[in-house]
Image (cartoon, rainbow, N blue to C red):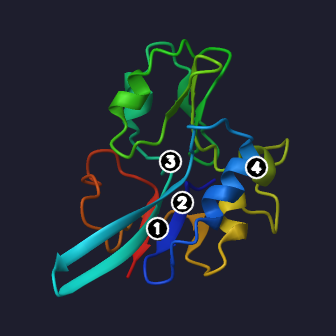
Amino acid sequence: MAQLSFKIDLTKCVGCKACEVACKSENNTPTGVRYRQVMEVLEGTYPKLSKTFVTMACFHCKDPACVKACPTGACHKEPGHGIVMIDQNVCIGCRRCVAACPYGAPQYNFTTGKTEKCTFCYTRIIDQDGNLIPGMAPACVTSCTGRALTFGEDSGDFGDVPPNFANPALTKPAVTFTK
């Protein structure tokens, strides 16, 4: 099975944050824990400024820094689709994965004392046999009104990486940006 990947068309995102709301609702995360965040990126200088919206979450890297940093193995890469998961029964809440991730994906939950992150809506899109469920997509993808956020098999091409994005060579994120 192939590595799953987010596809983000930077020309279509209008910053509505529907993906953030859908993610929060799907995962029932507490205040302060945000698996997906829409960032505003300014480019140029006045009077020629432009604003781009970049939706950020865990990019389920092919060489994830969070997995390497985790002392217990709670943070691991699921072999079937390359989804990076955190086993809540094994996580000790040390936050090493939080510090290691260049994208800010892992989120510490002060209520549970554990770290959490985007799971690609695993239980929503993967059946009990480990197969993709036809027609299903992560909540953030289905809520994207501009169709800026999609998902599928990773192409291995990062595309048009937005400004101030961490060097993709470091962790090989499973994401493709288009402009």
- Determine crowd level at label 4: few under 14, some 14-19, many 20+ residues with C-alpha closer than 10 A: some
Q: If you read the primary sequence from the N terminus, does the residue marked by circle 2 or circle 1 appear first?
A: 2
Q: If you read the primary sequence from the N terminus, does the residue marked by circle 4 or circle 2 appear first?
A: 2
- Check if mark 3's residue and mark 2's residue have beta carbons within 8 Å: no
Q: Amino acid at mark 2?
A: Ser
x and y percentages locating residue 92 in the rendered image:
54, 12
Q: Amino acid at mark 4?
A: Glu
Q: What residue is drawn where x is 51% and y is 77%?
A: 13
Q: Which residue is identified by label 1? A: 155
At numbered mark 1, what does the secondary structure look like: helix, strand or loop?
loop
- Check if mark 2's residue and mark 1's residue have beta carbons within 8 Å: yes
In this rendering, the label closer to the viewer, 1 or 4: 4
Which quarter of the rendered picture does the C terminus lie within?
A: bottom left
x and y percentages locating residue 76 in the rendered image:
54, 29
At numbered mark 2, what does the secondary structure look like: helix, strand or loop?
strand
Q: If you read the primary sequence from the N terminus, does the residue marked by circle 1 or circle 3 appear first?
A: 3
Residue 123 left/right relative to 1: right
Place residue 27 in its image quadrant: top right
Place residue 129 in its image quadrant: top right
- 59 to 45, vertically: above or below: above
Q: Residue furthest right?
A: 128
Q: Which residue is identified by label 3? A: 58
In this rendering, the label closer to the viewer, 3 or 2: 3
Q: Which residue is identified by label 2? A: 5
Q: If you read the primary sequence from the N terminus, does the residue marked by circle 4 or circle 3 appear first?
A: 4
Q: Which residue is identified by label 4? A: 26
Q: Mark 1 to mark 3: distance in Å? A: 17 Å
Residue 131 left/right relative to 153: right
At numbered mark 4, what does the secondary structure look like: helix, strand or loop?
helix
